[in-house]
Amino acid sequence: MQPGKQSGIRRVTSWQLVGAQLRHFRKLAGLTQAALAEQAGVGEDTIASIEQGRRALQLDMAIQLDELLETKGVLRVAVERIPRKERYQALVKDFVQYEQNAASLLWYESQLVPGLLQTEAYARFIFGCNYPPLEEDEIEKRVADRLDRQKILERKPRPILHFILEESILHTEMGDPDVMREQLLHLRRCMDLPFVSIQIMPRNTPRHAGLSGPLILLETPDHDGLAYVDGQLRGELYDEPADVSALMQRYGMLRSQALTVAESTRLLDALLDALLGETCPAQHTPPPARRPSTGSSPATATVTAEPASKSPTTGASPATATVTAETASKSPPTPPPSTSATPR
């Protein structure tokens, strides 16, 4: 074979072999994909994706399917024997599944509020900016999916969530001023959740460790470390220990460069004071469970009360509020609560 020329041989992954086994046992049992999906309590597309090797078969589901198909643990053993190098490869498109089951998440964002912390209106505006433009029904589907992901905030046991946001995110107006005001108030409420820690990266940070863009570090329930880096067309999932370690070190540097949790809270309070024209409320209730709707979201209902001194119609946007990390951190810093969410 000439150098650089493809052999034409299609590589078969371990997940495709597991999928082929499932398909074989399903047919032996005389079941259609729809019938097996109904018995397993999942969608037909889930069974189809597993059989095609496009979705990894999770261990708990493998045990369930072994019972339904009476395969005496064959699928369970097959999943347990998947090489580590391939264990997570098939689930790049299904990162949300990892996210929902994560023991901890470390998330650095450079341009947008992280998806788990977005309001409905903020998310809708972001998807409306997609190019080529999305159809309205597709936008609404993506908004619904994004809000559904936020169920992790209600999950028990609670995950440990740590976020680092660039200060510029707070000042970049997404949509009209009401959208940003709602988003910033929601972000402030999230800061009070005991399992959520948020740090702000000052705009004047020298030798910034995050110039390569956003990243997410995740600890699975089995205490494996994963890293996810989103791209223009698709995301990349990394599970090699050397790769995860390098990105973990980068995240550690970002944490040391950012404002402390206490300083970050004061910065956002000062920004909200400037936007609302009044003292930011001392009491912040946790964000309510928000689900997609055709009307205003529950989050909107909690923040639409008009401030005592409303800015003009063209009013001050987050960009016009001259509250910065430098001014917000002039008061003596108080020790922040423990925020360690490093996978162990």
Image (cartoon, rainbow, N blue to C red):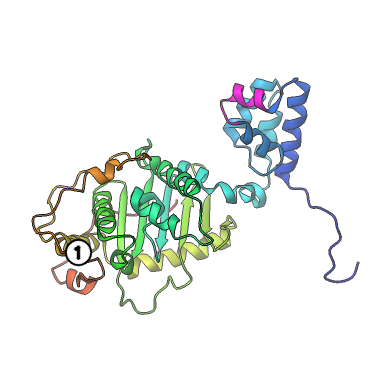
Identify the secondary structure beneath mark 1.
Answer: helix
What residue is rendered at 12% in x and 52% in y? 281
Residue 46 % position (x, y): 62, 35
Considering only vertical position in the picture, is 219 above or below 165? Answer: above
The residue that disc 1 covers is 271
Q: What's the amino acid at mark 1? A: Leu
**Residue drawn at (68%, 33%) of the image:** 77
Question: Could you tell me residue 178's position as x and y percent?
Answer: 25, 56
* Residue 56 point in image, percent of width and height: 63, 41
Is 126 colored magenta in this rendering? no
290 to 230, vertically: above or below: above
Query: Alpha-carbon neighbours of circle 1 within 10 Å: few (<14), some, or many (≥20)?
Result: many
Q: Is residue 341 visible?
A: no
Residue 80 seen in render? yes
Q: Residue 186: image x %, image y %?
A: 27, 51
Query: Residue shown at 27%/44% (left/top)?
Result: 299
